Amino acid sequence: MAERQNPTERAELARALRSAVRGEVEFGATARALTTMDASNYRRVPLGVVAPRDADDVTAALAVCRAHGVPVVPRGGGTSIAGQATGTGVVLDLTRHLNGILALDPASRTAVVQPGVILDELRTAAAPHGLTFGPDPSTHSRCTLGGMIGNNSCGAHSVAWGTTADNVHALTVTRYGGDTLRLDRGTVPESLTGLPELIRTHLAALRTGFPELPRRISGYALDALLPEHGTDLARAFCGSEGTLGVVTEATVRLVEAPAARALAVLGYADEAAAAEAAPGLLPYHPLTVEGMAADLVREPAGLPRGAAWLFAETGGATPAEARAHAERVLRAADALDGTVVTDPAGQRALWRIREDAAGTATRMPDGTEAWPGWEDCAVPPARLGPYLRDFRALLAGHGLRGTPYGHFGDGCIHVRIDFDLLSPQGVARFRRFSEELADLVVAHGGSLSGEHGDGQARAELLPRMYGDELVALFSRFKDIWDPDGGMNPGILARPARLDENLRFEVLPKRPVDVTFGYPHDGGDFSAAVRRCVGVAKCRTAEPTGTGVMCPSFRATGEEAHSTRGRARLLHEMLAGGVGDAGGGGGVIAGGWRSTEVRDALDLCLSCKGCRSDCPVGVDMATYKAEFLHHHYRHRLRPAAHYTMGRLPMWLRLASPFAAPLNALARVRPLAALAKRLAGIAPERGIPVLARETFTRWLDRRRGKGTFIFSNDEVAMVWPDTFTERLSPEVGRAAVRVLEAAGRHTVPAGRGLCCGLTYVSTGQLDKARKVMRRTLDRLGGALGTPVVVLEPSCAATLRTDLPELLHDDPRAAELASSVRTLAQYLEEYAPDWRPPRLDRPAVGQTHCHQHAVLGDAAERRLRERAGLTGELSGGCCGLAGNFGFERGHWEVSAACAEESLLPSVRAAEPGTEVLADGFSCRTQLEQLGGVRARHLAEVLAEGLGEGPE
């Protein structure tokens, strides 16, 4: 099929589509760039994107595309790992509108869903009836049912509930050209001319050519059409990877969800020993038997002794029954060590390690990049141990490394391998290894794909698994469905080569000139952007626990406002060429001057949530600052960059005139004019300036003099801009607390600034200048622990400072000295007992604290003080300058309404509202009418009256 890249033909196609469908038709650079990649190694540039509103729109779009000879790729969450969710024609985005649950019948245990419904939404709807959808890939919070049907997804619980194909009852499907078919068991639509004859004349090949495996996902499931299997056309369609038609409606089966669950965690000497033990657990009917080795566990996780582990989940009608079931598994297992976890929070923490593996495995322990491509081979469970030994030997023979993990109970292994996909030699080795591994899998009686489908990564090698006769039948089956070849060409039937269309080919061949150091990416901005592999944890509809990422996506629902979407745009910007570093023809033109990237980054709150919550550590706040630095270099900036971006300077100048300026700010016409000139949202109130700064109060209280910084009883407090000039009451409270803990408090210095506001607005030259001046002024105090009360300033000192001043060793010294108040008290006054407050608390952990500093010490301090309850996750939405900038009000308010404001409104009278960040407190006051306090203020109040 011809690919149409001619601008005139593309414009004609776009006009025809807009005339035919009611949904969005987007042929601009942003929409195309967002869909060039999925979660695989591959990249194909589409002509445009259509978001159909209903099944009629799907029919109309397919008819237009057939008339214009343009291929079509159905796309759900875009988390496919083999390249099947990318294409060169029109991408159908089925997530935007076709995302409903049309019916749910607890009696028949079925649900009728549209293809774009998120798996977790179906599970949530089924849960009140004690039901769930059995297959549950690790991307359950963002993958779609349509995508699961296309790939025949499985997940951790397939040992109990099977694959997606095992749980599909019937499908409504539209073919290329627009005709719609109903697929179920026992009948073949007349329009599929030649299909009954194909089956009838090749019964022997279909009965003998498919290996018996619980996880045989590769190829088309033609054996489902055998008479003895009920001629199940819906099952045969599952796993067809968008090559036959588009699902517009699916009737799926639901299963009973255990009321209680327990987790037997079993330790083994190595992964092969764990793999050999897994089949022995199956007779005890666990819900899962998952396996992973120590090289996937980057931090202590409370696992039992061993170098590899099995997770065997069990269910029961009661917690006691589930625990007893898990204990039977534990007793039966021949393990080095083991434990049973019944606490739901403990189980979630362990499962999070396993679910994040698709991301964390993309980096080896030494930081080397690792990639999919051989992500999910499956062998008979009884062969898994020997297969893993041979697999490790094959890796070593090619000088490669990987971290296998996965569904040991089903014989399915996931692994990311440190292929060099940037050089011709590395790509050639990738091909050789792939061919040899395919042969190894087949030798063990396995399937090239055990979960994620063949896509472009493995389809070329299907003859090694099935032989030429069956693969020829695959092509004939495809042609019966799609005689024009318009549905996702190059996938499964007559596939593209596995080393074509690699997404790295278009990136610059040498590093781009940047300002940040990117220490975890070898100083290479392209390598930093490559971190995003597309697993799309940033696309979850709700924050996970106390997680943050990605508030702007949850507010807008737009891919461009997710961490992944922004990374894709940056990838295409780099591919289009930046400076003299080169590029290979990306969708985004203009390099650092790109308006598409600027607009997508505009709604990034710089919350840094992705730095900690993204499994691969994408740091979009840093990338945004880098981009803004280049985008506005030698150009006029938005007004807010000159006002809020240089806030420390303006506040320093304004402090002597605090009283009259506060009075003027209360005059509405003057305030409105000031906000308009300053680029501030008209809905925002102007914060009140402190009439006495924190350091002036401290000088007046203690008297000026010289302090000996080596004194073990001296606590240095960082006079950040917010504590110094906007909320000195926080500093005063911290002094009270530190003195009660036996520490004498002094300011870290005068005129110090972390550079936060300059960084967040991309004024990096100014930020570096401010930071160097700060290091100069600290002088001999460098290396002394310093208490930073504002979490955003602490995070800037901890990360942005050493990454911007990577050539100055003093920056790393100061970064290592930063402590929050709770961290400082725990480290330097461990015997101090805080006042007992004994009341509940609500509020929000500051997003920068969550992402950079951690809040474990704060949790322990609150517990010791008797402040009970969990603080909410997410982001308050103000996020420094973000929520003040004109045009950000709606998103800012939506972020606050997600978790923070509802939790505060639901609190009982007398509940303490905590917010250590100035932004969080301001947002609560302006949107909720609530006065929140820093933990220091609450503790100081609990100490009783003291000297002021």
Image (cartoon, rainbow, N blue to C red):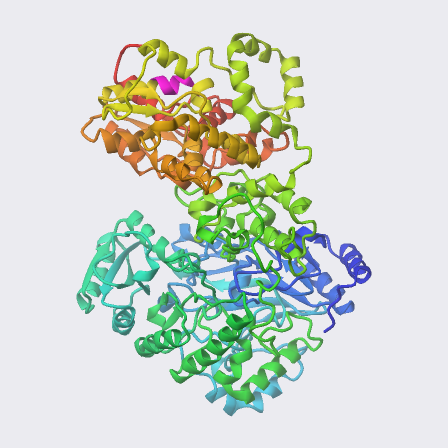
The residue positioned 38% from the left and 28% from the top of the image is: 779
The residue positioned 61% from the left and 27% from the top of the image is: 642
Q: How many marks?
A: 0
Q: Quadrant location of the C terminus?
A: top left
The residue positioned 44% from the left and 72% from the top of the image is: 450
Along the line of sight, the residue nearer the viewer: 594 or 99: 594
Residue 473 as seen in the image, left or right of residue 324: right
Is 377 above or below relative to 589? Answer: below
Question: Which residues, given as a range, are shown in magenta?
Answer: 726-732
Residue 169 as seen in the image, left or right of residue 813: right
Residue 341 image offset from top left, x and y in percent: 24, 54
Q: Residue 87 sits in which quadrant? A: bottom right
Along the line of sight, the residue nearer the viewer: 486 or 670: 670
Q: Residue 1, can we see it?
A: yes
Q: Residue 893, can we see it?
A: no
Magenta-drawn stretch, dominant element (helix, strand or loop) = helix
Residue 157 as seen in the image, left or right of residue 501: left
Q: Is residue 728 magenta?
A: yes
Q: Is residue 653 magenta?
A: no
Residue 757 image offset from top left, x and y in percent: 52, 30
Along the line of sight, the residue nearer the viewer: 662 or 484: 662
Residue 17 image offset from top left, x and y in percent: 76, 58
Is 657 above or below relative to 569? Answer: above
Residue 818 image offset from top left, x and y in percent: 35, 33
Along the line of sight, the residue nearer the viewer: 316 or 383: 383
Q: Residue 488 sits in which quadrant? A: bottom right
Q: Quadrant location of the N terminus?
A: bottom right
